DNA sequence: GAACTCTTGTAAACACCGTTCACCAAAAAC
DNA sequence: GTTTTTGGTGAACGGTGTTTACAAGAGTTC
């Protein structure tokens, strides 16, 4: 069955345990606790052995980031699948809420992946689910407003690039989009939505609202309402 | 002139040098380079001596956060003062642009202060300039829309608390606000604006837009336009 | 001025960290 | 059966936060 040799299986197994230990340390004791020696201790080996698997502590951390992104994407896909309404508005809601819930439940992971002045986002994994959903959202005819003229011309170049990214992301899953549906106005609004979603979630995770929030959930839902309304969803279509 | 004793002056001087060295290390080589031994090395003393000034490495980092907030507030106040238009819309623009400019010029500081899952925002310093401006903005009659009815009732409690924070922040500077001007609708929009401003700036600093942005500045200005328009500013009042 | 206390530094030590190196045993390849 | 590759070890280097015992100077009291 398994085409791999015995050695390859063992290696894969150890690698899995390394990732798992690193993840547990991050979750339970924070970024600074993800230490080569601590990981090795968990596996019952010595620290230098880890260099047979990763070039450096930094490389291991990058791998950890990728794992986190993949896991988060899986969670969000599950949230998306759990929505059986078939309405795009509800799907957007489900994913946005899922993102918030995930971030609040995994603050250390969120901080590591989304709030480090790091490399230029090596995360191929990251946001694939967002891109997927954005693609679907744009493909759906529910979004009626937003012609290209609203968008300042200086942004065209960048938005066209994002347009291509979206097309690629969606086409991977077999869906194709007609060119005229994917206009720059819609794309611009997708970006704006990402700004608001990310801003709200990050502020909540980091506790950087200028006052203590005792009812965070309805505040998020309220933001979501307005966001969806700005994108162009009717109220009844995006019913809670 | 100086009422302090010789010893007190020396102590204050050393403390100043410690903060300065810590800041320089953060800026030049990142958070992980802000090390007790590195700071001590810079001052020509040994690491344990720093424990005469701070209880721990963590306490020193907290102090560093406060310093950063104070400096940023000074910069933003200067940006505010540099606007001679007298129009609140232009002042909001000036401060928001100032915040973005500061964050991009000081990514390490921004990450430390605004994107760490830390203590519940001990920053009394932080955002005082934002609160100031928000108070002024609300006090001005330019914002005409936004009655209380738009705001979900579950949020009332929190927003009232923020209302009090705003009142206090503004009253410190001698300005008083009539109660009816400071309605919950306006306050809610201030919070929403903070979400968008923070979200955009953080995404830019951390490079987490889903595509490479070649013209970041007009994209920010565009967001700012829409934000101000949503708050209720007329275009001509907030002319660029 | 002498004796005393308080302040601010030191040096040594402990336990931890990332990383490198020489070495070694077992597995795989030949 | 010999050789090579792989995945581990232990020792070491220089780095870290922190504690402790100790010393020297400044300020205070008599």
Image: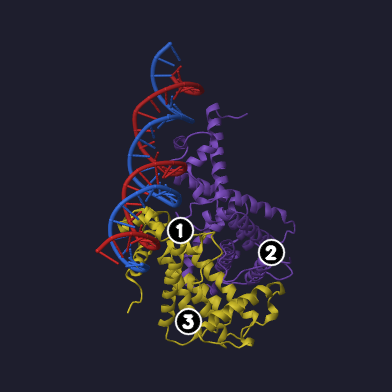
Chain colours: A purple, B yellow, C red, D blue
Q: CA distance from mark 2 to mark 3?
A: 37 Å
Compared to residue A154, the image places residue A46 above or below, namely above
Closer to the N terminus: mark 3 or mark 1?
A: 1
- Residue found 46% across the figure and 40% down from its top: A54
- Front-most of residues B127 and B92: B127
Q: Chain of mark 1?
A: B
In the picture of the structure, the residue carrying the numbered disc 1 is B55
Q: CA distance from mark 1 to mark 2?
A: 52 Å
In this rendering, does residue A173 appear at all? no
Asked if both marks, 2 and 3, belong to the same chain, the answer given is no
Q: CA distance from mark 3 to mark 1?
A: 41 Å
Q: Position of residue B36 (x, y in %)?
A: 39, 55
* Helix, strand or loop status at disc 1: loop
* Helix, strand or loop status at disc 3: helix
Q: Chain of mark 2?
A: A
- Residue found 71% across the figure and 66% down from its top: A238
- Residue B91, label in figure: 3
- Front-most of residues A216 and A2: A216
In this rendering, does residue B200 appear at all? yes
Q: Residues within 10 Å of mark 3 (few under 14, many from 20)?
A: many
State which mark lies toward you, 2 or 3.
Answer: 3
Q: Position of residue B127 (x, y in %)?
A: 51, 73
| Corner quadrant of residue D28 | bottom left
In the picture of the structure, the residue carrying the numbered disc 2 is A89
- Front-most of residues A3 and B201: B201
| Corner quadrant of residue B70 | bottom left
């Amino acid at each position: 069955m398994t085409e791999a040799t015995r050695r390859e299986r063992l290696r894969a197994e150890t690698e899995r345990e390394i990732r798992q230990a690193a993840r547990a340390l991050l979750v339970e004791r924070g970024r600074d606790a993800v230490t080569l020696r601590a990981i090795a201790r968990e596996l019952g080996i010595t620290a230098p052995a880890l260099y047979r698997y990763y070039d450096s502590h930094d490389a291991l951390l990058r791998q950890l980031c990728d794992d986190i992104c993949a896991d988060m994407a899986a969670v969000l896909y599950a949230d998306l699948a759990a929505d059986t309404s078939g309405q795009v508005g509800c799907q957007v809601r489900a994913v946005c809420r899922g993102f918030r819930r995930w971030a609040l439940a995994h603050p250390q992971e969120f901080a590591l992946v989304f709030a480090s002045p790091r490399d230029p986002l090596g995360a191929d994994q990251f946001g694939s689910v967002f891109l997927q959903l954005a693609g679907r959202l744009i493909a759906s005819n529910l979004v009626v407003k937003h012609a290209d003229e609203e968008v300042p011309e200086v942004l065209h170049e960048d938005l066209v690039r994002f347009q291509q990214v979206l097309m690629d992301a969606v086409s991977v899953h077999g869906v194709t989009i007609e060119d005229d549906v994917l206009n720059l106005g819609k794309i611009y609004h997708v970006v704006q939505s990402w700004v608001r979603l990310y801003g709200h979630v990050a502020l909540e995770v980091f506790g950087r609202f200028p006052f203590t929030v005792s009812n965070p959930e309805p505040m998020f839902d309220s933001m979501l309402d307005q966001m969806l309304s700005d994108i162009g969803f009717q109220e009844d279509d995006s019913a809670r």
